[in-house]
Image: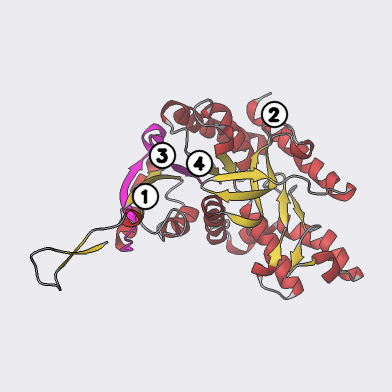
Amino acid sequence: HIVQTKGRPPYSYTFTPSNAMVESSINVVVTGAAGQISYSLLPRLLDGTIFGAHVKINLRLLEVAPALEAVHGVVLELEDLRAPLLGKTLVTSNPEEAFVDADVAILVGAFPRKDGMERKDLLAKNGGIFTEQGKALAKVGNPNCKIVVVGNPANTNARILADNAAPTIPRGNITALTRLDHNRLHSQLAMRVGASVDDVKQAVIWGNHSATQFPDWTHATVKGVPVAELLKSEEDQAWLKGDLISCVQKRGAAVIKARKLSSAMSAARAIYDHLHDLYKGNDDWVSMAVPSDGSYGIPKDLVYSFPCKCKGGGEYEIIQGVEVNAWAQEKMTITKDELLQELATATGA
C-alpha cells in the first residue's frame, strides 16, 4: 500500500508491503545433492513457479559423508546464481538434521546398481537407506511434509519409506516419480502425430517405474481427438501396441547407452513437473506413483502409478472410472506382480 505521509510535501510517500508481498519461507530437503539430477533440479526450485514468487527456499542438502565437499561446491554455485529466492542452505549427512521441520523432501539419492550386482542386492541396499530415512522422518518429521521419491527402485523405496515414516508422515504424503515416463509417452505421441506436447492429454503410466510399466495411450487425445482415431492405420496401430510401449519402457536404458550416464536433465524436469502440478494443480491426467487405496484391483498401500488429478496445495486424488480393457488389464497386472515381488525381496517377506 502507498500512503501519503502527513506533514510532508504531496510527493513524499511511505511504502508498506501488502500481505501478498510479505516474504515467507519453505524448507526443502534434497537428497543425493551432489548428483547430476540435483545439479539440474536445484535452480528450477528457486524460480518461484512452484512454491510462489515471494517464497524463500531454505535448502537442506543431504548427502553421504564422502560427497559433502562436492555439495559445498554446489552451494557456491547456488550463491552465484544471484537467485532472490535462495534462503538458508544446510549441508549435512545426518537425515534427522535434514528432515526436521521440512515442508518438502525430494529423495533423489539411492545406491546405484553396479556391474555384477543382482537386483535383489540392489533392493536390499536401498531398502536399508530408505528404512533409515523413514525412521528419521518418523522421529523428527513434519506431518504436513510432502515427499517425492526419485531414487530407484522408486516405487518400492517409497513403500519402505512410508512403512517406516508412519505414523508421523501420512502415507498419502509420499509419492514416487513416474512423471519422466509420462513425459516420454507424451513426447512420443506428439512426434508421431506431428503436434505439440501440450496438445496431448490423458496419456498416462500405470504401475512400476521399470521396464514392466504400462504406458497407456488408449484414452489419450491430441487437440481433443482420440489418438486411436488419428493413428488408425495398420502400421500406426502396430506402433501403438508395440514400439511405443517398448520405447517408453526402455528409454532410460537407451539414454545410458548413448550418454554412458543416466537421465539427469529430463529427470530434473520431471521432478519439477511433478511438484509444480502437485502445488499448482493440473486439469489433465497426471501420472504419479501413490499408495493404492484399492482402486483398479491394486493391493492397498502398494505404491503404484495411477492417473491422478492434482488439485493444488499438495493435494491429489486417484482418478476413478477409467475404462480398462482386457489388453490393458493384462499389462497392469504384470507390473503389479513385479511390484509385489520387489517388495517381498526388499523386505525379506
Amino acid type shown at disc 1: Val
Q: Marks 3 and 2, how far apart in space?
A: 30 Å
- Looking at the image, tell me whether mark 3 or mark 2 is earlier in sequence order: 3
* Residue drawn 78% across the image and 62% down it: 244
Q: Marks 1 and 3, how far apart in space?
A: 19 Å
Q: Residues within 10 Å of mark 3 (few under 14, many from 20)?
A: many
Q: Which element type, helix, strand or loop, lies under badge 4?
A: strand
Disc 3 target residue: 102
Question: Residue 284: which quarter of the image?
Answer: bottom right
**Residue 118 shows up from this direction:** no
Judging depth in this view, the residue of 77 and 279 nearest the camera is 279
- Looking at the image, tell me whether mark 1 or mark 4 is earlier in sequence order: 1
Question: Residue 219: which quarter of the image?
Answer: bottom right
Vertical placement of residue 345 versus 103, above or below:
above
Magenta includes 163?
Answer: no
Position in image of residue 6 (x %, y %): 11, 63
Judging depth in this view, the residue of 22 and 160 nearest the camera is 22
Q: Which element type, helix, strand or loop, lies under badge 2?
A: helix
Give the total number of marks visible in the rendering.
4
205 with respect to 17 (left or right): right
Tag on residue 146?
4
Q: Which element type, helix, strand or loop, lies under badge 1?
A: helix
Tag on residue 252?
none
Task: Determine whether label 3 and label 2 are within 8 Å by CB.
Answer: no
* Magenta segment: 81-110
Disc 1 target residue: 71
Amino acid type shown at disc 3: Ala
